[in-house]
Image (cartoon, coloured by chain):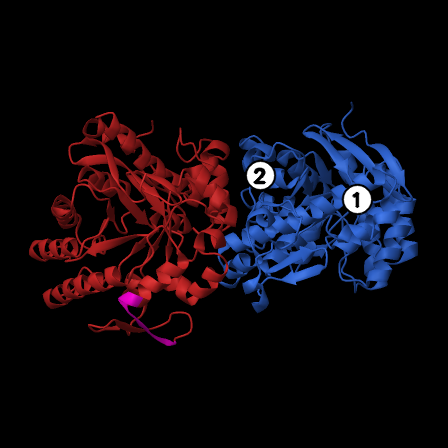
Chain colours: A blue, B red
Amino acid sequence: MNYFDFKIIAGDGGARAGILPTPHGDIETPCFMPVGTRATVKTLSPRDLSEAGAQVVLANAYHLFFRPGADKIASRGGLHRFMSWGRPLLTDSGGYQVFSLGPAARASAGGVEFKSIYDGSRHFFTPELSVRVQEQLGADIIMCLDQCPPADADPGELRQAVERTAAWAARCRARHRRRDQLLMGIVQGGTDAKLRRESTARTIDVGFDGYAIGGLSVGEERPAMLETLALTAALLPRERPRYFMGLGDPAGIMAAVAAGVDMFDCVLPTRLARHGAAFTSGGRLNMRGAALARKDEPIEAGCRCYACRNFSRAYIRHLVTLEEILGLHLLSLHNVTFLLDLTRKAREAIIQGRFQEIRNCLMRPT
Amino acid sequence: MNYFDFKIIAGDGGARAGILPTPHGDIETPCFMPVGTRATVKTLSPRDLSEAGAQVVLANAYHLFFRPGADKIASRGGLHRFMSWGRPLLTDSGGYQVFSLGPAARASAGGVEFKSIYDGSRHFFTPELSVRVQEQLGADIIMCLDQCPPADADPGELRQAVERTAAWAARCRARHRRRDQLLMGIVQGGTDAKLRRESTARTIDVGFDGYAIGGLSVGEERPAMLETLALTAALLPRERPRYFMGLGDPAGIMAAVAAGVDMFDCVLPTRLARHGAAFTSGGRLNMRGAALARKDEPIEAGCRCYACRNFSRAYIRHLVTLEEILGLHLLSLHNVTFLLDLTRKAREAIIQGRFQEIRNCLMRPT
């Protein structure tokens, strides 16, 4: 089997189930990819992730460029070995971080000038540098450098982001050498249908083996997000994997699967855990609630995660209210498992031709 | 086999190997007991502890009395069930915390008046209350309420602590009802040989199925600690388990095993982890050191812990310098495993009659 030769094995309406082969193993889609920004998914070890059913883990080129340095990771044998994760990895280009973390980022046609959040030093990121950094890290899937404007960006800013993203995509493509990495193009354009169509067409023109939908889930209204998502997914080549960047709420993921998206990532499960909240099929649960102190049941009945198999809501509440790290760990594990299970069940339903039928039930315990 | 019927299966000089049966399983001694103050060993799950070889875990009556409350834990089925730890548990009486955590603790013959560190509310702890709280928690081994003076206490304070500890021991013994719990007496007396002898004799007079050596490792000089330890251990009944409270440095533990101590506890392994340091056979290792960024070897070659089996010093340094929780977790796991392994190897050496011979080698990799 050729690497990155995406195979769709079943479809149900717009939703599809697929297999994406990579040098570190197959990825079964739809799938959720836990985010390990600085080469660690917060509070979770690789074996926690394996047990939870993670197939792909993300890491971030921006953060690893500064700490410990991409060259340092390359010297240690690459990112897989460095973080002891033998399965597929995806690195984000750093584009989102360059614009969102630095107040003084200045983009030009050439690239972006910005200050490091680590020490304030000035740097200039280019498409070429981003690809080189990602080649040094050695993830299976890497991303083009893009410009991702906020939801309240004005039309001029949106248009410029589309222009730059397209130009940079071509430069990333031209610079990329490693044949054992899938380079994905990214579509921008905010929620402007015309710009989305243009950005999609221009990204496809450059030509990639996978496409990401960027610039959504950045603060826009839900209906506009869903509409733009559906529009964009429908324009992308059917035979290539589609990745919706930064979407982590369960209902949103189900809607995107229905629209034909294959891959998802988000920091939401671990961030929610830091806020003391858990995903459940009935919605988010505040684990600090006083009533939970008398509850012997797990966070979610029927959940197969280590936290739900072993601990009561009462105990986890005790840990969370005292800010004990085990509480943070157990909530992170549960929340990540919840999204991994949700996408796995969606996949099974698609294969059985029952996705449309049971989509709403997937948010109930099985 | 009767619970708490301690059996010495081998001796080597003063050192001995034993088995202490409890309602939740046998404890093989010498052993190190990880400290889970608030019903969690910081950053470690019960399965981490099982895998590391922990046989007994400590929890603290003071902290659990306030959060979530001993009655709350009793309502949830007791401490074992609450924290999902099916093996032996030991609770400390809260005496040490009452005196060390509250600046305004006032002891009288009746008990101690103090302010809660959680909300400043005033409370009065008595021997009877401490036993009742520990009966509600339901650990296999519980401790008498004692008065533990600091290393710089004046002679009058030391004497008073011996008096009160003896009187409170008798009251704890009289109040204790649960036959499925071993109640241990505690010897005080600082490093004053005369007071130690008196405290030991008076504690033995009350009569317990196990004895703890308290009031050491509280800031005194090492030679005085070792001398007092040897003196006290030699006076305790040979056929009862001996527990040295609060000792966690590897060399100190080996010295205490040589003196005939069976059980140890300390927060040092998890506290060291929070300071970014690791136990190694060559001494403590500062995991923040810049040179570690190029090291592919594990923290300790040959260590069987999950951290050493999977991660390089370079990766753990990366995590620790960025204050990623996985770094704290891996260091805690390693440090706890290190002391568990040290006492396990000491036990094996005692059984083989080689403890005196290899005692110094135990600090080298095996």
Mark 1, mark 2: which one is toward the viewer?
1
Query: Does B219 sit above or below residue B251?
Result: below
Residue B332 as seen in the image, left or right of residue A70:
left
Q: Which residue is mark 1?
A: A346
Inspect the magenta stretch and tell me whether residue B123 lies in it.
yes
Residue B286 as seen in the image, left or right of residue A7:
left
Specify the quadrant that holds the N terminus of chain B. Answer: top left
Q: Residue at 52%, 57% (x, y): give it.
A: A315
Q: Residue at 29%, 65% (x, y): give it.
A: B100
Q: Which residues are magenta?
A: B121-128
* Camera sees residue B149: no
> How far apart are labels 1 and 2 at the CA level?
24 Å
Q: Which residue is mark 2?
A: A46
Is the residue marked by circle 1 packed among few (<14), some (14-19), or many (20+) residues within 10 Å? many
Q: Residue at 46%, 37% (x, y): give it.
A: B51
Quarter of image, res A90: top right
Inspect the magenta stretch and tell me whether residue B216 lies in it.
no
Chain letter of the residue beneath label 1 in the structure image: A
Residue A42: give x, y in percent of width and height: 57, 49
Q: Residue at 40%, 28% (x, y): give it.
A: B302
Judged from the image, the secondary structure of the residue bearing numbered disc 1 is helix
User: Does mark 2 fall on the same chain as mark 1?
Assistant: yes
Specify the quadrant that holds the C terminus of chain B. Answer: top left
In the depicted view, which residue is nearer to us: B169 or A116? B169
Residue A357: give x, y in percent of width and height: 88, 48
Q: Which tag, 1 or 2, sits closer to the chain's start?
A: 2
Chain letter of the residue beneath label 2 in the structure image: A
Q: Residue furthest top?
A: A1
Amino acid identity at mark 1 = Ala
Amino acid identity at mark 2 = Pro
